[in-house]
Amino acid sequence: EMLAVWCVAFWEHLGKPHKFLLVELGPGDGSLCKDLLKIFKKFNNFYNSLEVNLLEISDKLKKNQKAKIKNKKVTWIKNIKEIDRGPIIFIGNEFFDALPIKQILKKKKIFFEKYVTLSNDKKKIRFLHKKANNSLIKRIQNLNLISDGNTIEYPIEAIKFLNTISKKINKFNGGLLAFDYGY
């Protein structure tokens, strides 16, 4: 309910546009969207202006979401680049947490990237540290966040998504609410 009210308040902040887009990033089982729509219906002007896009790349999850969310205002997209209008409110629950990261360790002024592999008998997970490539090292050094013995997580995909989202917000107006309301 609080997330839905935040969306309505942000829409009001945008000047109550007659048409706007809500994009849920990685909607999982569709529960958040279903709950939001239920609350949105209590705000007639908001609801009448609303169009929802669910960014989902998994066909299996999309099928589950379609079974749960039966609303003509909802459509599915596989890529943010499909968004060609706004204003837009992007919303994401644990979206950025689900994206892959690179773990980097610095030992004696040498940068190593952490890899996961299976043991020869394929029964145990093993971690390997391989010398990081020069382009990754340069990006890590520019952040100036690591000292000897520290490990940092470098979210390459999250940064790409944030750049794309930022460009859409700059072009069409809008905002982003990203959160994790787990335990």
Image (tube, grey):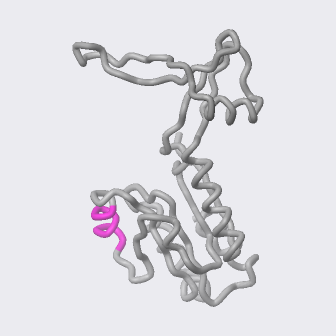
Q: Quadrant of the N terminus?
A: bottom right
**Which residue reaches farthest front?**
134
Rendering quarter of residue 70: bottom left
Residue 127 x %, y %? 43, 17
Residue 97 x %, y %? 53, 43
Residue at x 73%, y 30% (from the top left corner): 141
- Find the magenta span and give its range: 62-69
Rendered view: 29 above or below 113: below
Q: Nearer the viewer, residue 128 or 64?
A: 128
Residue 169 x %, y %? 67, 69
Residue at x 59%, y 52% (from the top left corner): 160
- Please check the rendered image and state whether residue 109 is part of the magenta-colored stretch, yes or no: no
- Residue 125 seen by the camera: yes
Rendering quarter of residue 89: bottom right
Rendered view: 138 above or below 112: below
Residue 99 lies left or right of residue 30; in this view the side is right
Residue 3 x %, y %? 60, 63
